[in-house]
Amino acid sequence: MPKIHPETKVLIIKRLKTRSTADVADTFNVSQRQVQRIKKTFEDTGDVFDKPRSGRPCKTTAREDRLLSRKSKVSPFSTAAELHETWSPEVPVSTRTVCRILSRNGLHGRISAQKPALNKRQLKNRVAFAKAHSLLKEWTLEKWKKVDFSDESSVELHHSRRKYCRRPTGARMDPRFTQKTVKFGGGKIMVWGYIQYGGVREICRVEGNINSLKYQEILATSYIPNHKRGQILQQDGAPLHTSIFTSKFLKAKKIKMLQDWPAQSPDMNIIEHMWGRMKEEAWKTKPKNIDELWEACKTAFFAIPDDFINKLYESLPNRMDSVLQAHGSHTRY
């Protein structure tokens, strides 16, 4: 049945004042039923315009939608196509419809965060450390300011993280829209660094494999000359950090350590944010070899504002609280 234009409906109402329904229907080439419906709508509402409609009815029922949502929650890593195969609504629907139903129920497709695996012992250690260094134990910002955070990090010449692009249909393999990769990242460098509240920092390049002796050399040249009395050095539990030789070296140099640092806890080590920002800025320069990469990393590391470091320190009390609230599991940091 063709839709009648609103202006035509107005003319039909005017003609009905002097003519019959049958005559009006013949004049405008519509059915009498349509004329009667327009007349009734006008008498009920005083208008001839259609009310806003909700659109096409859903093919699936609310119960079927709930079943699909439950399946997705039970198996969050299943794709829409996989869920579609195990879900059997009365009316066949497309995979795209499955995506829309899940989104409507607050289940959106996202790239999952990559976090270190934690066992029960590590969860327990994270909670214990967070409790011992929480505000309840008087670990205020003033105490955290005395801690120097340190760590190693490797930087690849060509990073291979996923990138998004907008391209026309059928152009997936067009060189303009492909991300170029190189085996083993095209080479990489290892760096060590530390940060201190107020913006003091240092970074050095580590040649070859790092072991306990080389780590002591790094500390002797890049940390100890700038070390202030009363400062506390934070380091993770890597064997080269906790070996007998390293421990004796630190004790001989009267370096106080932050004790019981939990394993698998990059979210608690604020220098990780420095590495992330440094790498982003270094890669923007598009270095051609590992020497250029090192220069770019060094420049980017020292270019990070002091205020950025201070804000990382200011987040430490909240980080401890977040670990406690998560019962030792991963946090948003």
Image (cartoon, grey):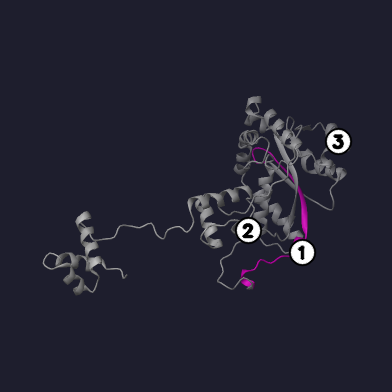
- In-front residue for pair 98/234: 98
Q: Amino acid at mark 2?
A: Glu
| Residue topped by disc 1 | 183
Q: Are marks 2 and 3 in contact (CB under 8 Å)?
A: no
Q: Residue at x 51, y 50 (%)?
A: 63
Q: Which residues are magenta?
A: 175-199
Quadrant position of residue 162: bottom right
- Compared to residue 118, the image places residue 206 above or below, namely below
| Residue 31 x, y percent position in the rendering | 25, 70
* Residue receiving disc 2: 82
Horizontal arrangement in the rendering, residue 245 relative to residue 77 (left or right)? right
Side (left or right) of 227 relative to 33: right
* Left-right relation of 218 to 92: right
- Residue at (84, 43) in percent of width and height: 217
Q: Is residue 188 visible?
A: yes
Residue that numbered label 3 is attached to: 249
Q: The C terminus is located in which quarter?
A: top right
Q: Is residue 119 above or below residue 279?
A: above
Crowding around mark 2 (Cα neighbors within 10 Å: few <14, some 14 to 19, many 20+) is few
* Kind of residue indicated by mark 1: Lys
